[in-house]
Each structure stands twice: as C-alpha cells, then as structure tokens.
Amino acid sequence: MTRRSPLFVGNWKMNKNALQTRSFVESFLPLAENLPANVGIAIAPPFTALAAAAAALRSGSRVALAAQTMSEFSEGAYTGEIAASMLAEFNVAYVILGHSERRFYQRESDATIGAKVRAALDAEITPILAVGESLEVREAGNAVAHVLAQIQAATGELTEAQAARIVLAYEPIWAIGTGKNCDRDRAQEIARAARSARRAFADIPILYGGSMKPENAAGYMEMPDIDGGLVGGASLEAHSFARLIAGAIAR
Ligand code: 13P
C-alpha cells in the first residue's frame, strides 16, 4: 500500500523558554537526523522561543518549525497578537489552529479559526487544523458529526486547491494530557470520516493527538487514515519524542 508521508509535530504548549529550547534542539537534531527522510518532523515552541529555535535549527534543517496559533489579521491594532508574516520571518512552516485549549481558554470560534486557516494559507504557512469532541459529545454518540461540523466550519470557504494544502489533527479533548489515549479504531473511524468529507482531503496528512506516547504511537500508524501525531507531553523531552517517532514508523 502506498502511504502518505508520516508527520509528527511536537506541541510544547506553554512550556520551555529560549534556553531550554536551544538545549532541546541540540539534543534532538542528531536523533532526528537518523530518522528516515520521508518523515516530516516539526516542533511548536512558544512564540518567545521561536527565534532561539530557528537559530538552533539552522536553515535546511531536518526539523521544521511550527507556531501554536496566529492572528487572522495581517497587521494593525490587535494588542498581543502575532501575524503570519511575523512567523514567516522565522521560517515557520506550520501553524496549529483551533486547538481545543484555544477554543476553550481564548474562546476561539469556528469562524475565527476559519479566518486564521485562510490567513495561514495566504502566507504559505501550512495550517494544522485541530478538531475533536468532549467526553459529553462522545458519550452522546455525536463525535463524528461534531468533528465534521468543526471541519466544515473552518474549511468550508476554501477552494479545493486550498483545502488540499491543510493538515488535520484529530484530538479528542478527553484524551489530551489525561493519559487516556483514544482507542485506535475509534480514532480511525473519525479520521476516515474526515478524509471522506471532501475530495481535497484524500492525500492530506491526518494526525492523531491526545496522550500519544512512545508505547502507543505505532498502533495509530497501522490505521489507514492516520498519518502521524500531534504530540504534547511526550514531545517535551528530546529522547522521548525521537523514540516516539522511531517506534511509530518502525513497522
Ligand atoms: P498530550 O500529548 O500531552 O496529551 O497533548 C496532546 C495535544 O494537545 C497536542 O496538541
């Protein structure tokens, strides 16, 4: 079976200062350089550590940079916000958008997330659109419908060509940071539904996120519609993240 290239993105959330970031990169780069060239690898440090990460990674590095969010606006009076063009200065290749923590704590709406996705694409930064249901929605049997509605709301206005340039990340909220990772067959069911939602999604990477660890990553990779991971806690330590990726792609 031909496969889409795997992609693993470390979402550091609000962890690591510039010094800690440089030290991570120095440990992680040699490990990443031993991984097969077709495997995409990115780290998403906080904004304040992007410069340190960019300097430590150097250009043409095996590891790409991602941001954890960005503004939907290109510039102007938006105190505290960061524009796509500012991320591009640090060669940021990906931006995570719609993470459940931002939907919850920053009250980001589907409409805002959709505007951010379009702004990222306009800036040639690949959006990683995160979607996922709460435990309540899951238990009511509405997980698939909920995720499809989130995807439609954030990508409905994209052209086919634009939609083919995004990455999707399925992150059930109840699995994030809890140690209770989603059963791989359930994750596959959602990934399949997401991929089938639109022809443009046929070849995009679909990632799983939510307590992905070195011990469980390989199981997800055996699923036909799951192409990698959006990894939180297990991406914070260089050896753990490298071990997770190596294990995931071993079979
Ligand atoms: P954990 O891997 O820590 O559960 O976090 C997942 C996540 O939210 C990645 O975006």
Image (cartoon, rainbow, N blue to C red):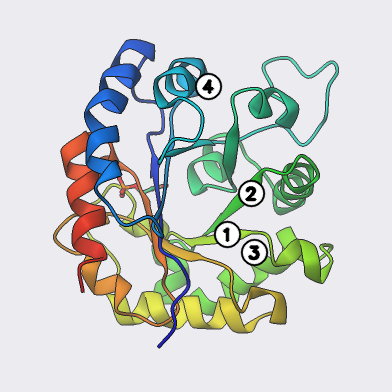
Residue mark closest to the camera, 3 vs 1: 1
Between disc 3 and disc 4, whose residue precedes?
4
- Identified at 75% across, 52% down, the residue is 114
* Three-letter amino acid code of the residue under disc 4: Phe
Estimate how packed mark 4 is, as few (under 14), some (14 to 19) or many (20 or more) residues with alpha carbons within 10 Å: some
User: Whole-Å distance between the Cαs marked 2 and 1?
Assistant: 7 Å
Residue at the far top: name it.
19
Would you name the residue on which mark 4 appears?
A: 47
User: Whole-Å distance between the Cαs marked 4 and 1?
Assistant: 21 Å
- Can the viewer see residue 142 in this picture? no
In the displayed structure image, the side of residue 168 where residue 3 appears, left or right = left
Between disc 4 and disc 1, whose residue precedes?
4
On the image, the x and y values in percent for residue 51 come to 51, 16
Estimate how packed mark 2 is, as few (under 14), some (14 to 19) or many (20 or more) residues with alpha carbons within 10 Å: many
Would you name the residue on which mark 1 appears?
A: 167
**Regarding mark 4 in the picture, which secondary structure is present there?**
helix
**Regarding mark 2 in the picture, which secondary structure is present there?**
strand
